């Protein structure tokens, strides 16, 4: 199905009108490879391509992959992020403006005023549900030719309600990768109240004894007086004290890039048994040996976020387990969301249920959920 999707994109890129295409494929289905080939087609036509990711962690991962794939082919790839030195930033700006950089990868920094593209022809937005409508459109306006609009490819496993509605009623074509790589284990999802956290720890100890690794995801970095949520830093301390026989890692958005990379490398290399994290690991993290995902305060997360987080496991051959810990009492809508996640691993089904629960948003506006306010007289 990847070959079919690349063919659909290639046909669009040959046309005079700009492409508006949704690339929908479940977590781990190989969307990044398809995006890379689309960028290679653009570069082959002497044009530039931009890849926008929601987090620096994911942007750096995309950059590393693209450099390893494309530099042997003579394709120049650059990374633009907020923590670059002033000198490195100026060099990237100059390379993009003069056209010596073929592919630029970054976060929201890609559409800042100082970034001027010489011949931007293709814009790829990864994990589209993490961006607002205005953010995505602002990058589309960066073409040096005011009379032309770049081709746009948006990628996600679970389209937000507005995007799903646009594929049905708006001017958005859809390409679907409906196959997963062979040899992947199943993911079982269970829901437990926070009172059973000790039993969850026992389960993780057993998995680690088998040589597996685990994620433990919390919605907050630090404890908050306003929000009664589980915090990553206090959970990290709790697990270190309780599970002293295991190596515990910690990663969240306030850490420096160097510390985040070190924490992720230790986990990828098997030096860390449990990685405590915020939702910063929601997208792009791929560790085949990880088989357990614990998500705290799961009742407060949306369907898309829960499915994306769960997609960090199940990438190896072993059966995986996703444990959703919730705090009582549960609202009716939270019960519905958790029931959907427990019942299916199919991102397509989850996206459709999300559309039913939240509404399609505005096709002619910027709201990405809710019911359409127009009335027919």
Image: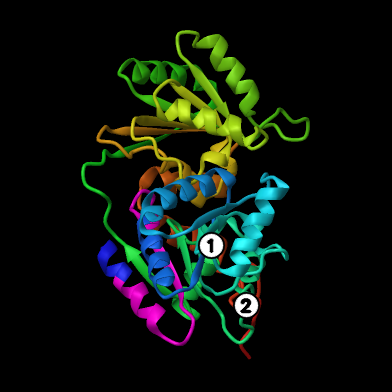
Which secondary structure lies at badge 2? loop
**Residue under the point 40% across and 40% down:** 286
**Residue under the point 60% across and 76% down:** 143
Inspect the magenta stretch and tell me whether residue 19 lies in it.
yes
> From what the image shows, is residue 362 above or below residue 71?
below
Magenta residue span: 7-32
Q: Quadrant of residue 115?
A: bottom right
**Residue under the point 47% across and 86% down:** 17
> From what the image shows, is residue 210 above or below residue 304?
above
Judge by depth and name the residue closer to the eye, 337 or 202. 202
Inspect the magenta stretch and tell me whether residue 199 lies in it.
no
Instruction: Locate the N terminus and report the quarter of the image it occupies.
Output: bottom left
Residue 305 in view in this figure? yes
Which secondary structure lies at badge 1? loop
Residue 293 x %, y %:
44, 32
Residue 328 in view in this figure? no
Using the numbered discs, state the Cα–Cα distance from disc 1 to disc 2 in whole angstroms. 15 Å
Judge by depth and name the residue closer to the eye, 180 or 338. 180
Is the residue under label 2 in contact with that under label 1 (CB below 8 Å)?
Answer: no
Q: Which residue is mark 2?
A: 144
Residue 192 x %, y %:
47, 30
**Residue under the point 63% across and 91% down:** 377
Left or right? Give the position of 220 relative to 311. right
Between circles 1 and 2, the one closer to the viewer is 1
Q: Which residue is mark 1?
A: 101
């Amino acid at each position: 199905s990847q070959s079919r999707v690349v063919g659909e994109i290639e046909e669009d890129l040959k046309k005079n009108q700009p492409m508006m295409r949704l690339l929908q494929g479940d977590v781990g289905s190989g969307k990044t490879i398809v995006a890379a080939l689309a960028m290679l087609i653009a570069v082959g036509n002497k044009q530039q391509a931009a890849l926008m990711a929601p987090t620096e962690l994911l942007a750096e991962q995309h950059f590393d992959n693209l450099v390893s794939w494309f530099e042997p082919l003579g394709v120049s790839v650059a990374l633009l992020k907020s923590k670059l030195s002033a000198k490195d930033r100026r060099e990237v700006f100059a390379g993009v403006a003069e056209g010596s950089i073929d592919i630029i990868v970054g976060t929201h920094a890609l559409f800042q005023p100082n970034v001027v593209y010489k011949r931007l022809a293709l814009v790829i937005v990864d994990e589209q549900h993490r961006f607002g409508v205005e953010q995505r459109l602002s990058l589309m306006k960066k073409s040096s030719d005011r009379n032309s609009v770049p081709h746009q490819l948006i990628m996600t496993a679970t389209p937000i309600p507005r995007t799903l509605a646009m594929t049905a009623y708006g001017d958005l074509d859809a390409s679907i990768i409906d196959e997963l790589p062979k040899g992947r284990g199943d993911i079982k999802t269970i829901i437990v109240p926070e009172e059973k956290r000790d039993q969850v720890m026992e389960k993780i100890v057993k998995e680690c004894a088998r040589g597996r690794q685990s994620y433990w995801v919390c919605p907050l970095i630090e404890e908050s007086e306003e929000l009664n949520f589980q915090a990553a830093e206090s959970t990290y301390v709790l697990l270190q004290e309780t599970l002293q026989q295991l190596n515990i890692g910690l990663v969240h958005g306030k850490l420096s890039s160097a510390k985040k990379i070190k924490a992720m490398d230790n986990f990828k290399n098997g030096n860390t048994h449990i990685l405590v994290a915020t939702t910063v690991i929601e997208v792009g993290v791929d560790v085949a040996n990880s088989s357990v995902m614990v998500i705290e305060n799961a009742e407060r997360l949306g369907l898309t976020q829960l499915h994306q987080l769960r997609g960090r496991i199940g990438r190896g051959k072993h059966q995986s387990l996703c444990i959703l810990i919730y705090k009582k009492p549960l609202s009716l809508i939270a019960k519905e969301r958790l029931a959907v996640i427990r019942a299916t691993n199919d991102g397509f089904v989850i996206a459709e249920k999300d559309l039913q629960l939240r509404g399609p948003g505005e096709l002619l506006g910027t709201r990405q959920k809710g019911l359409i306010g127009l009335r027919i007289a």
